[in-house]
Amino acid sequence: MSDPMRVRASESGGVVDVKVLMKHDMETGQRKDASGKVIPAHFITTVTAVCKGKTVFEGQFGPAVSKDPFLNFKFKGGAKGDAVTITWVDNKNGKRTDEAKIS
């Protein structure tokens, strides 16, 4: 399993601001290793955020996204103390889910 994501969520004026740092190598499939062999593509394909059972963010990534992607988004409807759950899935069916409480 990959390293945990760093997730921060804060509410101000009815708007929740979420910041996520995802640990992932995000290989494009175009680089070569020291012996000249192509490193297989391995990247995040989908990212989903859920709060109170409702999807508040959904995105699709591809091989052009940098290593250890950072994501920042805002949504309405969350309150302090609610949990925001972030899940990513990669092209090799790897999956990671982490959660943060809104402060």
Image (cartoon, grey):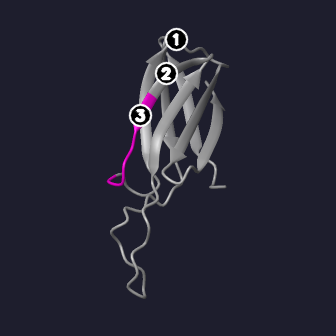
List x then y, in percent, for residue 72.
42, 35
The residue mark sitting in front, 1 or 3, is 3
10 Å neighbourhood of mark 1: few (<14), some, or many (≥20)?
A: few
Is 25 inside the magenta-drawn segment?
no
Assign a secondary structure to mark 3: strand
Determine contact: label 1, label 3, CB under 8 Å: no
The number of numbered badges drawn on the structure is: 3
- The 10 Å Cα crowd at callout 3, few under 14, some 14 to 19, many 20 or more, is few
Please state if 44 lies on the left or on the right of 8 as rendered: left
Query: Mark 3 is on which residue type?
Result: Gly
Q: Front-most of 93 and 66?
A: 93
Q: Is residue 8 left or right of residue 66?
A: right
Give the residue type that dot 1 points to. Answer: Gly
On the image, numbered disc 2 is attached to which residue? Answer: 56
Are the residues tagged 1 and 2 within 8 Å (C-beta)?
A: yes
Between the residue at mark 1 and the residue at mark 2, the CA separation in whole angstroms equals 9 Å
Question: In the rendered structure, which segment of residues is drawn in magenta?
Answer: 58-64
In the image, residue 83 sits, relative to residue 72, either above or below, namely above
Identify which residue is drawn at 32% across, 54% down: 64
Q: Quadrant of residue 26?
A: bottom left
Q: Which residue is mark 1?
A: 77
Query: Where does residue 10 sit, x and y in percent of width and height?
Result: 54, 25
**Depth check, front residue: 83 or 26:** 26
Q: Residues within 10 Å of mark 2 (few under 14, many from 20)?
A: some
- Which numbered disc, 1 or 2, marks the residue closer to the eye? 2
Quick one: quadrant of the C terminus? Answer: top right
The structure residue drawn at horizontal position 52% and vertical position 21%, both measured from the top left corner, is 55
